[in-house]
Amino acid sequence: MGSGSMTKPENGFLTALIQFPVPIVNSRKDIENNIKSICRTVKSTKAGYPGLELIVFPEYSTQGLNTAKWLTEEFLCDIPGPETDAYAKACKEAGVYGVFSIMERNPDPEKNPYNTAIIIDPNGEIILKYRKLFPWNPIEPWYPGDLGMPVCDGPAGSKLAVNICHDGMIPELAREAAYKGCNVYIRISGYSTQTEDTWILTNKSNAYHNLMYTLAVNLAGYDNTFYYFGEGQICDYDGNTLAQGHRNPWEIVTGTIFPGLADQARRTYGLENNIYNLGHRGYVAVPGGESDAGLTYIKDLAAGKYRLPWEDEMEVKDGSIYGYPTTGGRFGK
């Protein structure tokens, strides 16, 4: 692990995680100003770090968290659209991969929008689109994602996947990304300070359980209601924190990533090769190991019968505590 100061490492890449100041957004003009600020940041960061190949912005950095307006037509974007075109132009001019957050209009006008992340390559092409699979219940009104967990090629032999905020608390989702070949798992979020400790813990555990790097960055600053903790974090495939930001808006957390080392660990580790051992139990006693661990929750989930023993006693199972209707359908029209 180098200092991540400015140059491209041999057999690896330099990344920059931007602790973007939490946007206070009340109008479409505010969104347009955010987009201009993000594009300027892409170019200025590349100028300051010439070896930079991957730049990451937090969840909600484009459209903010104005819950009174974030489902209105004025605040929604399409992919592709003028917003993503601006990001594509910035990435192409800077010659970098970029990760961006978009609240995406649902093609079905009767359904709520998606919370979406995209990766744009140095040619200005959208190479990955991910819709948040696990909106943060009961706060977020986003329609659950329908694109699964895509993986794409990135710099220096990396295989990239993106998850959004609360997705990182679902260990099965990190395992899915790794199972599909991801060796650099990117998490963008807009958490307030209440979740700071679990954010750090789960970034480390997702890396350790799946022998992959995790790159994570959160909004930073105060929006007159909550404080957002920043804390850009880079973890290696053993779950060690290589770089850790602070609570400062505009802090840039940099680090050098060597995807080949994660790949090597997956090929050569005996002890702690957890992702392999899951499907090859007890291979010392049983050649090749047992593939079925008899895990009830996996079978029930696959069969559409997932149900907790205490489910009937749960007090919060819809969004009414935050004023959302319980009948489904489009909210905020």
Image (cartoon, grey):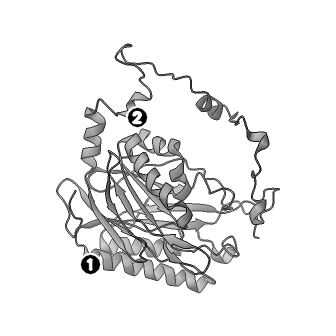
Quadrant in which the C terminus is drawn: bottom right
Tell me which residue sits at (28%, 33%) in the image.
Answer: 269
Q: Position of residue 122 (x, y in %)?
A: 33, 66
Disc 2 is placed on an element classified as: helix
| Neighbours of disc 2 within 10 Å: few (<14), some (14-19), many (20+) | some
Give the camera-side residue of 193 and 290.
193
Position of 41 with respect to 27 (left or right) is left
Point 48% across, 41% down: residue: 176
Residue found farthest to the left: 10
Residue 275: which disc? 2
Whole-number angstrom distance, CA of label 1 to CA of label 2: 39 Å
Label count reads: 2
Ranked by sequence position, the earlier of labels 1 and 2 is: 1
Between circles 1 and 2, the one closer to the viewer is 2
Q: Which residue is mark 1?
A: 47
At label 1, which amino acid type do we have? Ala
Residue 321 shows which numbered tag?
none
How far from the left and from the top, in percent, is residue 218?
47, 66
Judge whether residue 114 can be spotted in this image. Answer: yes
Tell me the crowding category of disc 1: few under 14, some 14 to 19, or many 20 or more residues within 10 angstroms, Cα based: few
Q: Examine the image and state in which quarter residue 285 appears.
A: top left
Q: Residues at badges 1 and 2 in contact (C-beta under 8 Å)?
A: no
Percent across and percent down for residue 297 are: 61, 32
Question: Residue 191, can we see it?
Answer: no
Q: Quadrant of the N terminus?
A: bottom left
For the point 66% across and 63% down, which residue is it?
A: 113
